Image: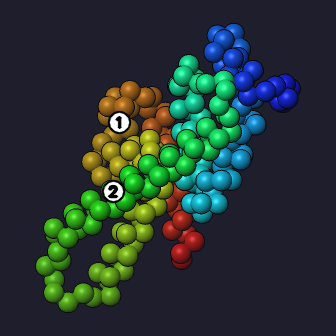
Amino acid sequence: MKNTKLSDSTLIEMLLSPNMELKAFDILFFRYSEGVFGFILSVSKDYYIAEEVVQNVFILLWKKRSLLDKTRSLKSLLFSMAHNEMISLFRKQKSEFTKRENFYAAFPSEISDHTEYEIEFKNLRELLDKVIDILPEKRQEIYRLSKEQGLSNKEISERLSISVKTVENQMTAARRTLRKYISLLE
């Protein structure tokens, strides 16, 4: 990409300029996304979490670009944002896991002896929940609305103000991810 030699402070100035903001953002993304991804991947050991964190960090950078300080290191800012985003994501996952555990505890099995079938079903359900938890946030929401609440693609699109095609694409991607992870265990 051209102009990758521009300083961060110049790029921040460009981000604040209506005519140059997209070009500056592209350069910044090209310059830092791989490093942020590697950092998060090394900590989380999860490709999908790293991918989601990078996405969220650059979305936040775009939304908050008017607040950027030209004197602050953009690299350290992005890595701090990535660290905070990862912690937030882990807290959210922990909270979801706790809610799920409480739900399952509220409905104990009425059959006293746990057969091999029940144990296998429980293990598969836990695996499915873990795989669903690693889906990107919107894809996870769409999947849960469809599978857990039984909404149609049209109902989901209306509720989330997105196209039916987007819902279909997200469901296809979610199913692909679920199949991929589950096939690894077979």
Q: Amino acid at mark 2?
A: Glu
Q: Is 90 positioned to the left or the right of 48 in the image?
A: left
| Along the viewing direction, whichever of 134 and 4 lies nearer the viewer | 4
Q: Residue furthest left?
A: 110
Report whether residue 22 is seen: no
- Kindly indicate the quadrant of the structure image that contains residue 105: bottom left
Please report the residue visible at 83 percent of the width from the left and 30 percent of the height from the top. 4
Left or right of 45 in this view: 124: left
In the image, residue 39 lies at what x, y percent? 65, 53
Answer with mark 1 or mark 2, whichever residue precedes in sequence.
Answer: 2
Q: Of residues 96 and 71, which is closer to you in this image?
A: 71
> Image point 59% across, 24% down: which residue?
68
Q: Secondary structure at mark 2?
A: helix
For residue 183, what is the image quadrant? bottom right
Image coordinates of residue 38 in percent, x first then y, are 68, 53
Q: Position of residue 75 (x, y in %)?
A: 68, 39
Residue drawn at x 20%, y 90% as measured from the top left:
113
Identity of the residue furthest to the front in this view: 71
The residue located at (69%, 17%) in the rendering is 13
- Image vertical order of residue 133 relative to residue 77, above or below: below
The answer to whether 17 is drawn above or below residue 154 in the figure is: above
- Is residue 165 visible in the rendered image? The answer is yes
* Quadrant where the image shows the C terminus: bottom right
Q: Above or below — where is 68 with respect to 149?
A: above
- Circle 2 residues within 10 Å: few <14, some 14–19, many ≥20: some
Q: Which residue is mark 2?
A: 96
**Label 1, label 2: how far apart the Cα atoms are:** 21 Å
Pointer 1 residue: 156
Q: Is residue 117 left or right of residue 79?
A: left
Label number found at residue 111: none
* Label 1–label 2 contact, CB within 8 A: no
Point out the frontmost of discs 1 and 2.
Answer: 2
